[in-house]
Image (cartoon, rainbow, N blue to C red):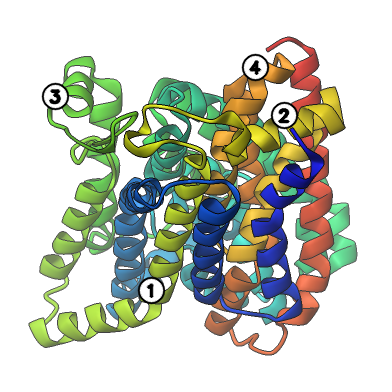
């Protein structure tokens, strides 16, 4: 293997870096330019037939389709809760049980943010305005609305991120979920260390650091326990709920017993209860995960299995419908809400689909027509894996979370890291003698941490809390914090590798 091919294998990342950092292109533009470049790179340099590129691109789109559905439904659900006032009523009800500002801020930052993300509801539009109400400055609220969930995001979104990772790598879904949940515990603690930078009284916040760390530890351990015993699909929701309960029980007062709040909370039960049932009752799990499924195989060696009754998108859709019925939303308002949600989300969805296609084109470079034969010296993941083994040796795990961070920083979406670098972990693991599952988990946790440094996510949050124009000052803090946290997670992953796991 030549160094030139190894260097060329990294050029998609270099191109995206230049476009994002130097030219400040949008995520959709990154997706378009990156897709075109990867198609040309695969065909002209890595000798991949056009038919292989064609089918790999469609395979990548279908692989990310469950995530695209969940993201769009999550955007629609969040807009619906805001438009109907349901979110405002839920927050007022919860915060009525807490007197201390820091307790309120931690309930929102680590409790509600992880509950919303766990339920596949985009957290920033909801959490950032709530934090402003608790006396956090707008720029700080924007940052905290992301920091609170970024350590645990890999096991949230109703498990859809782990689903995509399992589809990309071919590794077992449960093993990936548990490994990612374990890795998310130190990641969440690292995110907690970032919190005082963004609270209104930083000096007092540093004095209260034990409480902040305790909240992050509680939510991460609860999420880990839920991933192990209840299933990764509900882990984030359960973790957020447990922290909310702990803070409310320790707050000295209890929320008002308002029967009307049940109507606002009912849609969340429609998501939570079915996911608990299909993850914990053996016959229901077998029925929804192995029987009520359908498989599409565009590429003979990569069947894509859809599990509509096991995954979140069906229950998220039902929760949407229940919200519309309970709150008696007129059809015209609903139509307008769908239009607004589509206008907010289509660029993000298109970018994610393009990155999915790009990742699978990279993964299948070097294959002959029909995918029956592979020329390893033309396969980008194999070249990168072999090169990293040669040039970094046993230190490679140190850089895996940073790879995840890079993908999210450049594109705003953790799925880009999974699609671009997921297969690389499978290729590298046997060469290094380490666990492919742990490498893949380290990648996805690094991608989650990358959320705090993502210009796209920061832009979403600032628009929701009156901090537009302050994105640069936020990123000047969150970029080095994200890089540092990713490198520290690399140390954790490297030590796990040394332990022989």
How packed is label 2: few (under 14 Cα within 10 Å), some, or many (20 or more)?
Answer: many
Could you tell me which secondary element the residue under label 3 belongs to? helix
Q: Is residue 377 left or right of residue 33?
A: right
> Around disc 3, counting alpha carbons within 10 Å, would you say few (fewer than 14), some (14 to 19), or many (20 or more)?
few
Q: Earlier in the sequence, mark 1 or mark 2?
A: 1
Taking 452 as reference, is 390 above or below it? above
- Which residue is depicted at the point 70% across and 46% down? 403
Asked if 277 appears above or below 464 in the picture, the reply is above
Of pointers 3 and 4, the one earlier in the residue sequence: 3
Residue 324 location, quadrant = bottom left
Nearer-the-camera pick, 345 or 470: 345
The residue nearer to you, when weighing 434 against 284, is 434
Which residue position holds label 3? 291
Residue 291 % position (x, y): 13, 24
Identify the disc placed on residue 386. 2
* Residue at 39% in and 28% down: 231
The local crowd at label 4, few if under 14, some if 14 to 19, many if 20 or more residues have their Cα within 10 Å, is few
Q: Is residue 199 left or right of residue 362?
A: right
Residue 458 visible in the displayed image? yes
């Amino acid at each position: 293997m030549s160094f030139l091919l190894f260097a060329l294998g990294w050029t998609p990342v270099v191109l995206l870096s230049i476009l994002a950092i130097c030219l400040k292109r949008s995520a959709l533009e990154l997706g378009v330019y990156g897709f075109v470049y990867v198609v040309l790179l695969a065909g002209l340099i890595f000798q991949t037939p056009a038919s292989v590129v064609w089918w790999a691109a469609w395979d990548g789109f279908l692989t990310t389709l469950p995530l695209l559905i969940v993201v769009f439904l999550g955007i629609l659900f969040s807009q619906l809760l805001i438009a109907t006032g349901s979110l405002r009523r839920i927050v007022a009800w919860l915060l009525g049980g807490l007197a201390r500002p820091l307790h309120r801020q931690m309930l929102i930052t680590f409790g509600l943010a992880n509950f919303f993300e766990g339920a596949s509801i985009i957290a920033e539009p909801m959490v950032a305005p709530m934090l402003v109400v608790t006396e956090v400055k707008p720029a700080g609220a924007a940052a905290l609305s992301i920091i609170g969930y970024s350590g645990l995001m890999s096991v949230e979104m109703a498990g859809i991120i782990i689903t995509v990772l399992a589809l990309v790598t071919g590794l077992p879904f449960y093993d990936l979920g548990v490994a990612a949940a374990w890795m998310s515990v130190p990641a969440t603690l690292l995110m907690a260390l970032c919190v005082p930078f963004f609270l209104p009284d930083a000096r007092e916040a540093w004095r209260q650091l034990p409480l902040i760390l305790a909240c992050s530890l509680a939510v991460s351990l609860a999420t880990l326990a839920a991933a192990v015993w209840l299933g990764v699909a509900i882990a984030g929701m359960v973790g957020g709920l447990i922290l909310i309960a702990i803070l409310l029980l320790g707050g000295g007062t209890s929320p008002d017993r308002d029967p009307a709040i049940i109507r606002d909370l009912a849609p969340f039960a429609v998501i939570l209860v079915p996911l608990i049932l299909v993850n914990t009752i053996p016959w229901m799990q077998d029925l929804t995960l192995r029987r009520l499924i359908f498989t599409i195989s565009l590429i003979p060696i990569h069947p894509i299995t859809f599990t509509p009754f096991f995954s979140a998108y069906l229950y998220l859709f039902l929760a949407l419908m229940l919200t519309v019925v309970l709150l008696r939303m007129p059809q015209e308002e609903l139509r307008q809400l769908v239009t607004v949600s589509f206008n907010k989300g289509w660029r993000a969805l298109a970018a994610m689909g393009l990155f999915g296609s790009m990742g699978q084109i990279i993964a299948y470079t070097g294959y002959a027509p029909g995918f029956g034969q592979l020329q390893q010296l033309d396969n980008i993941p194999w070249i990168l894996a072999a090169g990293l083994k040669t040039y970094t040796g046993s230190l490679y795990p140190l850089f895996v979370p940073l790879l995840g961070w890079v993908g999210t920083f450049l594109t705003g979406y953790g799925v880009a890291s999974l699609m671009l670098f997921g297969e690389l972990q499978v290729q590298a693991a046997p060469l290094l003698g380490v666990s492919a599952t742990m490498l893949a988990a380290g990648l996805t946790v690094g991608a989650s941490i990358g959320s705090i440094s993502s210009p796209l996510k920061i832009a979403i949050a600032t628009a929701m809390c009156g901090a537009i124009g302050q994105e640069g000052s936020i990123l000047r803090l969150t970029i080095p914090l994200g890089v540092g946290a990713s490198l520290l997670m690399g140390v954790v992953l490297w030590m796990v590798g040394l332990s022989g796991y």
